[in-house]
Image: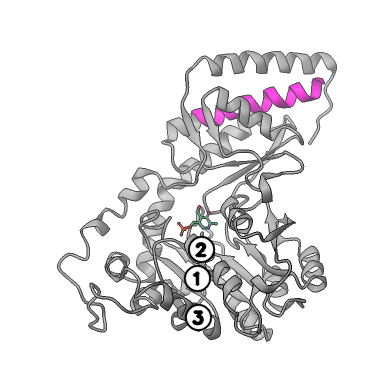
């Protein structure tokens, strides 16, 4: 990432960055680029949800949605999402309001109750470890930390996790029980897993017979371009490879309809679905089917879902374009940073010079621009290169976002040139 500069040129650039930073800090900004939340205008797209289901209280098969029961969720809602999540509707569960909760529950159930295909529970093993492609989603890592599951970082490539590393680790260590994957428009680097990666995940030899891929397809329909990315069907590939129980698929409408007030999904093999349903039956007498019915009425079908996501894209795409434009104008050719241009999802990853990310985040905060803490994209909050910064462009308005990204670029120049002068 380094570009050769004469000492004089470098001093000139640093002086300019210092002046720009002083100017930035003097503006009294208060901007927030931390979490990938939908903007109010995105939530407004689903306003009609709030007046549904109107006077209706029966699902397609005549079930009264106001009453207990129906643990697997409404079949008609599962039909709408089956294609997007690449899970047959019969093997899909429509559950509560959060896919993260489902991931949490799957970990807890795997620890405390025996998974299909084995005889002992994870909690009986001396050590449990998960592979964590990095950069990744901080809440996945927080779940592992919460339950004492060791995390083993695996580098991401443009095609998904480095499969040479993954194959070696899962083959040699029976304590490795799982891997976190955000296979499409990954959080935070926007990577989409290639067909070859999916095939290798499905067919690799694992020392643990109860190894599970936590396939968090949170951004399955969240495209930002005219060329929606399609990924290979992992669940089908696992079944074909003779490993039908290997994958847990997760998804939700949090970034489709209402964040935290949508519907979450779990899909897997028939055996795993029965396993989760059995565990859920102890935990709940049924999901919120009123909310599920309202989603059916609002989205209608898979085409309705797609049309809704086009409206989401119309709001999000200009923000991602603004980030790319400003970073390009302010940092292009400096050699101080690289950044991703995701084709979907919610994040841009900015990579600064090694050893600079924390300082950039600190300087930005001092100037009133709050970013996700540096390191959050890595297990235990520790980015060994201290280089990755996650940018979440969705929530602020366009004008605020532009100010924030321009300000962030000033901080990258300041910290980057300071480091080079040292
Ligand atoms: N998975 C990923 C990869 C996410 O980025 C997020 C939210 O940012 C979630 C899951 C949370 O999903 P939910 O709202 O369904 O719990």
Q: Residue 145 location, x and y as percent?
A: 63, 55
146 left or right of 259 in image: right
Local secondary structure at mark 1: helix
Pick whichever of labels 2 and 3 is earlier in the sequence.
2
| Residue at image location 55% in from the left, 85% down from the top | 271
- Quarter of the image with the C terminus is top right
Q: Are marks 2 and 3 in contact (CB under 8 Å)?
A: no
Report the Cα–Cα distance between label 1 and label 3: 15 Å
Q: Where is 23 relative to 401, above or below?
A: above
Report the Cα–Cα distance between label 1 and label 2: 7 Å
414 left or right of 114 in image: right
Q: Residue 357 location, x and y as percent?
A: 68, 35
The residue at which mark 1 appears reads as 85
| Residue at image location 41% in from the left, 56% down from the top | 310
Pick whichever of labels 1 and 2 is earlier in the sequence.
1
Residue range in magenta is: 403-422
Task: Kindly identify which numbered label has been placed on residue 273.
Answer: 3
């Amino acid at each position: 990432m380094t570009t050769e500069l004469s000492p004089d040129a470098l001093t000139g650039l640093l002086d300019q960055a210092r002046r720009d930073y002083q100017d930035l800090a003097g503006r009294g900004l208060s901007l927030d680029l931390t979490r990938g939340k939908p903007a109010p205008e995105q939530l407004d797209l689903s306003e009609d949800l709030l007046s549904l289901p109107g006077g209706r209280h029966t699902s397609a098969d005549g079930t009264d949605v106001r009453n207990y029961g129906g643990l697997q969720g409404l079949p008609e809602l599962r039909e709408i999402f089956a294609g997007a999540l690449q899970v047959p509707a019969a093997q899909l569960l429509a559950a509560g309001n959060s896919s993260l909760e489902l991931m949490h529950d799957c970990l807890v159930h795997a620890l405390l109750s025996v998974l299909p295909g084995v005889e002992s529970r994870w909690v009986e093993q001396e050590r449990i470890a998960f592979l964590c492609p990095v950069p990744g989603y901080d809440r996945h890592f927080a779940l592992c930390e919460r339950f004492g599951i060791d995390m083993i970082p695996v580098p991401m490539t443009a095609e998904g996790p480095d499969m040479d590393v993954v194959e070696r680790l899962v083959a040699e260590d029976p304590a490795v029980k799982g891997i976190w994957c955000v296979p499409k428009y990954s959080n935070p680097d926007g990577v989409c897993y290639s067909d070859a990666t999916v095939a290798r995940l499905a067919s690799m030899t694992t020392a643990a017979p109860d190894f599970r891929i936590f396939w968090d397809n949170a951004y399955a329909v969240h495209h930002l371009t005219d060329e929606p990315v399609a990924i290979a069907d992992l669940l089908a590939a696992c079944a074909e490879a003779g490993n039908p129980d290997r994958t847990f698929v997760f998804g939700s409408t949090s970034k489709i309809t209402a964040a935290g007030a949508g519907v979450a999904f779990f899909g897997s093999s028939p055996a795993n679905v029965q396993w989760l349903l059995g565990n859920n039956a102890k935990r709940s007498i049924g999901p919120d089917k009123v909310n599920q019915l309202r989603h059916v009425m609002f989205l209608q079908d898979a085409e309705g879902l797609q049309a809704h996501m086009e409206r989401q894209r119309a709001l999000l795409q200009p923000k991602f374009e603004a980030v790319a434009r400003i970073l390009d104008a302010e940092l292009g050719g400096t050699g101080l940073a690289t950044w991703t241009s995701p084709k979907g999802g919610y994040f841009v990853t900015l990579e600064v010079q090694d050893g600079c990310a924390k300082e950039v985040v600190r300087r930005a905060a001092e100037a009133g621009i709050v970013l996700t803490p540096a390191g959050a994209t890595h297990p235990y909050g520790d980015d060994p290169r201290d280089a990755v910064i996650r940018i979440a462009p969705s929530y602020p308005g366009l004008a605020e976002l532009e100010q924030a990204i321009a300000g962030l670029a000033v901080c990258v120049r300041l910290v980057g040139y300071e480091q080079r002068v040292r």
